[in-house]
Image (cartoon, rainbow, N blue to C red):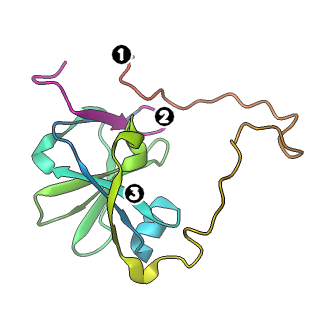
Amino acid sequence: MYKTQPTMTGGCQCGAVRYALFETPESTVCHCRMCQKAVGGPFAALSKVKTANLTWTRGQPASFQSSSAAERHFCSSCGTPLTFHYLDGDAIEVTTGSLDTPASVPMTKNFGTEARLSWIGLLAPGQRPDSPTAENATREVVSRQHPDHDTPND
């Protein structure tokens, strides 16, 4: 499948778009308002590689030029945010959560801290989303999420 073994793989939630990285990424967190809106969360966790070291292995992502300087890729089927990159740069950042093994890429820096939400760091450990609570005690959940590894193309 690959000329050389990738260091990491990843993709979107539905599996329509998959990628391989051919270097170990450096991971950071960006708290800027643009990143917050792009991922729909309080910050974006991003893992940077040289653009030449990312290959799309299944499907092609859609793109959105989020500013005059940058573009972001996402899955047009399920909406998963996948990348951020400066148009004139030689690097691209994949969303760390879209990696198959996100725990293996610890964050090393914070950016955009002027927009960091004041409650970040104040949250206590929570419960698992599948733990029984009054709200979900009778709810049956069947995941449609693509597994965290490459699968054969159908």
**What element does badge 1 sit on?**
loop
Q: Which residue is mark 2?
A: 14
Of discs 1 and 3, which sits in the foreground? 3
Of discs 3 and 2, which sits in the foreground? 3
Q: Which residue is mark 3?
A: 45
Q: Amino acid at mark 2?
A: Cys
| Residue 17, horizontal then vertical, whole percent | 36, 36
Above or below residue 90? Residue 144 is: above
Residue 152 - label: 1
Q: Does residue 58 appear anywhere in the picture?
A: yes
Q: Which residues are magenta?
A: 1-15
Instruction: Give neighbour class at mark 1: few <14, some 14-19, many 20+ (Cα, 10 Å).
Output: few
Nearest to N terminus: mark 2 or mark 1: 2
| Residue 97, horizontal then vertical, whole percent | 43, 46
Above or below residue 84? Residue 7 is: above
For the residues labelled 1 and 3, the Cα–Cα distance comes to: 28 Å
* Left or right: 143, with 48 as reference point: right
Residue in the foreground of this view, choosing between 125 and 32: 125
Residue in the foreground of this view, choosing between 15 and 60: 15
| Residue 134, horizontal then vertical, whole percent | 89, 45
Task: State the predominant SS element of the stretch in magenta.
Answer: loop
| Residue drawn at 39 percent across, 25 percent down | 149
Instruction: Give neighbour class at mark 2: few <14, some 14-19, many 20+ (Cα, 10 Å).
Output: some
Above or below residue 141? Residue 45 is: below
**What element does badge 3 sit on?**
strand
Q: Can you tell which quarter of the image residue 121 is in? A: bottom right
Q: Amino acid at mark 1?
A: Pro
Nearest to N terminus: mark 3 or mark 2: 2
